[in-house]
Amino acid sequence: MGLSVGITLSLLVLLLVKHELSYDKSFNDSESIYRWATKGILSANFINSATSPMPLGDLVKKYDEVNTVVRFVPGANNVVSYNDRKFNEEYFRFADASFFDVFSLKMINGESKEALLNSNTVVLTQAAAIKYFGEEDPIGKVVSRDDMEYTVTGVCEDMPSSSHFKFSFLASISTIDKILLRRADSTYVQNWKKDWLYLNCYTYVKLNPKVNAIQFEEIINKDKDALLLPQVQQTLDTELSTDSIKLDFYLQPITDIHLHSHLTAELEANSKPVYIKLFIFIAVFILLTTCINFVNLTTAKARRRFKEVALRQLIGAGRRHLVWQFLTEAILYSLSATFIGLVLLELLLPLFNFFFNLQLNFSIFTGWIDFFWILILVLIVSIMSGAFPAFFFAGLKPKQILQGDYQIRNNGLIVRGILVCAQIGVSIFLVIVVAGMWWQIEYISKKDPGFNSENVMVIERGSAIGEDFKSFKKELLDVKGVESVSACSSLPGDDYFQGTFKLKNGDNDKVAVLPLIYVDQDYFTMLDLTLKTGRFLSTEEGDSLGILLNNEAVLEYDIKKPLGHKMMVFGKKDFQLNVVGVVKDFHFDPYFESIKPLAMILMGDNMKFDYVLVKLDGHHSNETINQINSSWNHYTESSPFEWQMLDNKIDKLYDEDSRIAKIITVFAILSLFMTILGIIALTAFITEYKSKDIGIKKVLGVSRQNIILQIFSEFSLYIVIGVVLSILPAYIALSAWIDGYAYSSFVNGLVFVAAALLVAGLAYLSVFYQIYQMASESPADNW
């Protein structure tokens, strides 16, 4: 059964590794698909973004090296409706008609090449189609979003879970022109499409076979200068600026994005390669431990089969026949253990997916590749678990067996001891790594972010309120349990609008690119932000042209006297903002990133905003929430009311690390259990091997305590070596993981000691139990 459990656990870990390594490989010719990313410098501001300018796609598609280009633009969270069905849709995207030529999703209904050719057309995923239309045919039906209608022209399969982006609705990119025309003139629309300095989309390219991506990248960067540099020079001349602007574009294989890309404006949170290495290490360790334990337990009971081996040799069985006999037995054991393991895997996988929010799937009948790897696994397990017993038994001489004159060489014991030593070391390693991960997660949960998120309710898609925010706010303030109401364009952890400003600094101008949050005037007191100097923004003070900076912005751009400092909006020489105050730094980005410069501006009366914030008194009831919901329905015509608490929203920023920590914790506990089984197996082997010696010592009057201490001394060396060897690798692995955080707390050294004592203590207890039983037996029982 132990072999079956080991195989099940190894397969679970390997399925997780396979899932992580399979990202974006389900698309046809995935090895030829790349994403254009942007790096460069704007004055003193470094840019490294997953986005690119819209005209880059127009340039790239002209080259013979290119098969297809598609541009992809995320839409804002907005309500999509069909008849009486209304839902907030976060994954409403816009794309070129060539989207399905690059990303080979199967069309369930409609034609992929024609689905996005015209404006105001949209393709739904299968899940979205069922959500809105049920069993009704959606083709030709019209859905509404933000007062604009879209005709459904296709239904495609859902995006694979192992993709670096997702969507529910995919609308034609030409529709954006109409959206912008409702808010601006045609000149703005044309500039949006042709501006090389506006990183406003995600550009993907499928290259033709045998095209060298690096060489093609160099060609594009050389040729794009003819289009980019004139605009750069014109911008600098207009702004009378001596700053430098430099942009280059580089290709990222889409199969590398999930594990190796951590740029600004990523579509989804990506993972880390260190997790893959750690999971592979755990899988190999569990499989090796399982096989070692099997070998030790098999040879520990060797005496039961010695006579069988002797008799077979006496009737003519050669060494080769005996080897094949035991190898065949090992293969049969492995096959049966693998079968049981696969059954356990099928039973446990849904629970594993549920508890850890995964979407792993497995079936040996879905493809010959999985079936092939299962056969390889059976072969590996058979060889590892059966080779030593086969050659051990086949090497015995009949005369030695029948006379009882047989022994195992000391080097055999040493090898087993080293293997158990490795098991102990790995267990301590995993315990330390898990403890260090939870130490860091606890640290960031307790660390002061510089603002107060307690009892702050966040209502999604606040723009549904429209121009009635003041009335809505006033009505909510009359609700029992509501202390204050505010609104903002972004929350900690969100992507932020980037504002570009020109700062006067003596005789020199500096260009500053600042994350920018539009806020209601009560935002500052609701979150308990702390002023360093000046005052908060206020409508009563006439701060429509006021701006509030954080302390990092003042330091970064060397603003000597921030109060009253003028900041000109880049590209609008006549539009200046006045710095009215400076707040102490707070963490508006996750703890993965250091605090950056930040600016805050008051929302205009007609400005759309993403969130309504409601500060509750901490003693609120469901009735409070119901009254807020009722007011929301009144002012939004019953738009979906979706809310969560701000502290929960912030906690979700670290969900991936918490999920990985939980998974590794489970496997660390199971690995520790496997190690204890390994120690028990080795103890059984040694006591079986030394049973006659122990019996003789008892007859000669050696005390039970001395017998126990002698065997204990043999184990102690292996345990101590395992402890020592585990410390440095655990430190290195934990350091590599913590390096992903800009703010971290390395685990206390006492945790290393506690982990070593825990594993060593369990090892000694398991050894002591078996040795005590052996030492307590009658000498006759040892023969």
Image: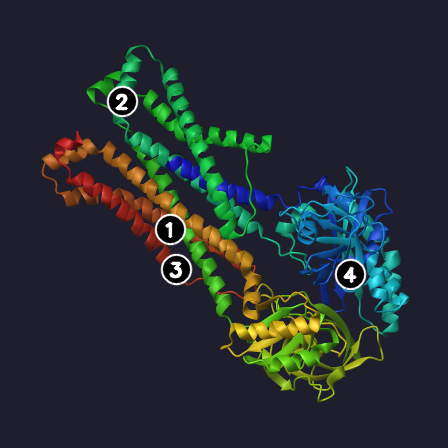
Instruction: Please name the residue that numbered disc 3 is placed on.
Output: 751
The residue shown at (32%, 50%) is 760
Q: Are marks 3 and 2 in contact (CB under 8 Å)?
A: no
Q: CA distance from mark 1 to mark 3?
A: 14 Å
The mark nearer the N terminus, 3 or 2, is: 2
**Above or below, comparing residue 386 to residue 724 in the picture:** above
Residue 49: x %, y % from top left = 71, 59
Residue type, mark 2 in image? Phe
Q: Which residue is mark 1?
A: 724
Q: Are marks 1 and 4 in contact (CB under 8 Å)?
A: no
Q: Nearer the viewer, residue 631 or 345?
A: 631
Q: Check the image and report above or below for 138 versus 573.
A: above
Place of residue 686 in the rendered image (x, y in percent of width and height, measured from the top left): 26, 36
Residue identifier under label 4:
200
Give the mark toward the camera: 1 or 3.
Answer: 3
Q: Marks 3 and 2, Cα distance to the nearest angstrom? A: 47 Å
- Identified by mark 1, the residue type is Val
From the top left corner, tell me how far across and down residue 81 is, in percent.
72, 60
N-term-proximal mark, 1 vs 3: 1
**For the residues carrying marks 1 and 2, which lies nearer the camera in this image?**
2
Q: Which residue is mark 2?
A: 306
